[in-house]
Amino acid sequence: MTPVDQRATALRLATFAALAAFAAFHWFTLVADPPLGRAALLVLVATAGGALLAGLGSAMARSPGRVGTAAAGALAALVTFITLFAALAATGVPADLLPPWRWDDLANEIDPALRRFHEIPLPYDGGGRWMRLAILLAAPIALATAAALAFWPAGRRAPILRGLSLAALLALYGVAVSWDGRRAELALGLVLLVLTAAWLWGPRIAARRGRWAAVATLAVAAVAALPVAARLDPAEPLLDYKQWTPFGEAAPAGFDWTHSYGPLDWPRQGTVLAEVKADEARYWKAEVLDEFDGLRWRRPPFEAGTPSLSPFSLTLQESSASHQEWTEVAGFELRGMRSHFVLGPGTIESVAGLEGVTPEGDGTTTVGGDQLRPGDRWAVISYVPDPTPGAMAAAGGYGPEVMPYTKLTVPIASGGLDPFGDSDQGLRQSVSVRPWGSASGGTPGAEEIIATGPYGEVYRLARRLTAEAPNPYAAALAIQSYLGNGFDYSEDVPLRPYPIPAFLFEDKAGYCQQFSGAMALLLRMSGIPARVAAGFAPGAFDSGGGRFEVTDFDAHSWVEVYFPGIGWVTFDPTPGAAPPRTQPSSGLGPASRTGSGAAQGRPLPEVKGETGLAPARGGGEDGSPVGTVLAGLGATAALAAAAVAAVSVRRRRRLRSGRFARDQIVEVAAALPRLGWRTQPGATLLSLERRLATSAGPAAAAYVAGLRRHLYEAGRRPPPGPGARRAFRRAVTGSRGRRARLRGWLALPPGGPRHRSTAVSG
């Protein structure tokens, strides 16, 4: 390298460091009490990475024959990878979360913060550890990328890459000052102009070429820009991107919790609906559906304010008074939904922060007048039983006060009910089953009425499942265990004349409404008081803010079973692979988690501002996973691009040739369990094809059918190719969220399967 080249490289490094510091320091001021020491360390790391890349480029120039292009690219990618991870660590990402095997943990921490990123006021002073880090993460990604572009050993393409590097740094600065309005914009603009000119013309100035032309161009640009900039009104942006609504203003989501059992039509866009400040993950109940009308579970209409089942409600109040340790406080804030119902865990006992609240006797709490809308906040004290299995098994029998919850309406003639009307009320009859363990009670002849109608097979199944159960708790477990084996989760189900019998004996697939509706009906037919509850699964927990974020993916339906002296206990028969992202428990038993203590003696919090929802103060600069994941994936992809491309091309060729057909079958058998799909041992391709047709869709079934026909049908049809394999991957992962799609790429990698053939059955 000549002295002129050395001076040009040194000047470029110095100018890069100045531009990087200018952009990074402005970005870091988007958080209160910005960690400027970390910003300086970040600039140093990015500049050091650039210097290493520049040194690699000079080594290639000195010995072009000794360092091959591919080797140089691999070394440059490695330097970029190291620079990126060092930059993330300098910004505050915990070092123990940076290795690839910890990316899932990192994503769990940062994802809730990133989804609220666009809603927070700046500079952010909430103190949430991961929220601060989510804001800062753009800086290390931008600086590491800019360093790689600026100093990559690219030969003739170097000027283009340096232009892209400048664009990355300018974007980091521009977004920061646009997002959080600054004073002295003109002065800052002049500084940026000088730094940009130095970046563009620094090497020529070092070589004594075009020095005066550069100075003259800079002066002309400043003179031309200053008057225009001075006339711009910061309060009236030329392009107000914050107000863009290209498809109209999004209306808050609303939910009709009455069961329908048809194809799921709830809003499913990942919209944040509510934030919950609570000590434990609970189900956030909106409405109780305590009537089965012969077709569906619904909440019967009754006059607002009239307590229903008053003797039963009194018994429940006595249980609550004797178990103060099961009383909890929770704070709520609506974000993207409207509701006539007050959300809360368990049974709400009191509400603060809302006017016109009416606790109904069925466990639903409503608001009078206008419905709740985004921005409304409230706090509740709720009774949330969290008993041990032994306590539920020893809870005792039932008396006549529970008969309203062993009541069901059944058709007395076959032919089906009108799912959209009530014109067939004369063909239904309401009966109450004799409560479990009671010597009397119930509607005379109730069992015969149910057994001889369209629900007879359901009744016989209920009696068979609970015949050996010594107590109601064991009976509930038996029913929940039955629904947990042999039934698949599917949101695309047909609307049947009798949905629950069809779910149990024909389709054997459904979503939360089918599972909860079937379990509650089987329990009532066994004489066990049960009802359906609807609302939301807990959502994603933000450890920094100390709250749960509930989205429209968390809309859910579950079962509540009554135990004397305890109250209503939550059970969830829906498979664990269902969309609600965080269920309080998995496996058998009540879907609850042991609480950390009681709210005994705790007053309701004051509901003036945050209803207990303000993020905890304190906390410093911290790490962020999605940034790390993207960074790590990007760097890893750059490091192994050539190898991956070669392997992918080779596998695609073998895939099209049919040489991978048996490997594809082995891959499918291994991938489905990894992606949450249950497969039966010894299942044939034909049985798997039929199951996938109803649970995953035609694309998944077609892929398996293509493999079966290629291997076993006459004529040796060509096997399904890369396009069909991609369609299969989308079908088995598309409705299960981003993490499932990532697992799908790992289980069914691009290109084709590895060569690992073994014998399979058709």
Image (cartoon, grey):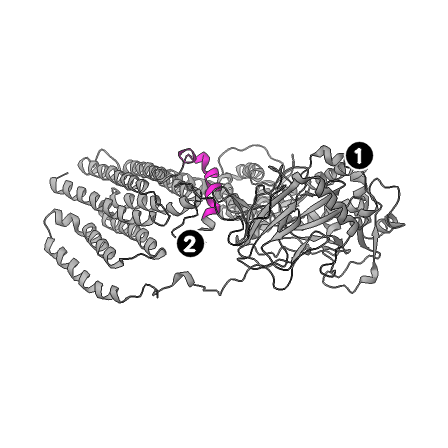
Name the quadrant containing residue 631. Answer: top left
Outermost bottom residue: 231
Determine if residue 567 is in view: no
x then y, percent, for residue 471 = 79, 36
x then y, percent, for residue 141 = 35, 44
Nearer to me, 120 or 510: 120
Q: Main secondary structure of the magenta part?
A: helix
Magenta-tinted stretch: 94-113
Amino acid at the residue labelled 2: Pro
Location of mark 1 (residue)? 470
Amino acid at the residue labelled 1: Pro
Secondary structure of the residue carrying numbered label 2: loop
Q: Is residue 707 left or right of residue 307?
A: left
Q: Looking at the image, which residue is at 25% across and 42% down?
A: 153
Secondary structure of the residue carrying numbered label 1: loop
- Circle 2 residues within 10 Å: few <14, some 14–19, many ≥20: few
Location of mark 2 (residue)? 121
- Circle 1 residues within 10 Å: few <14, some 14–19, many ≥20: few
Q: Is residue 263 above or below residue 42?
A: below
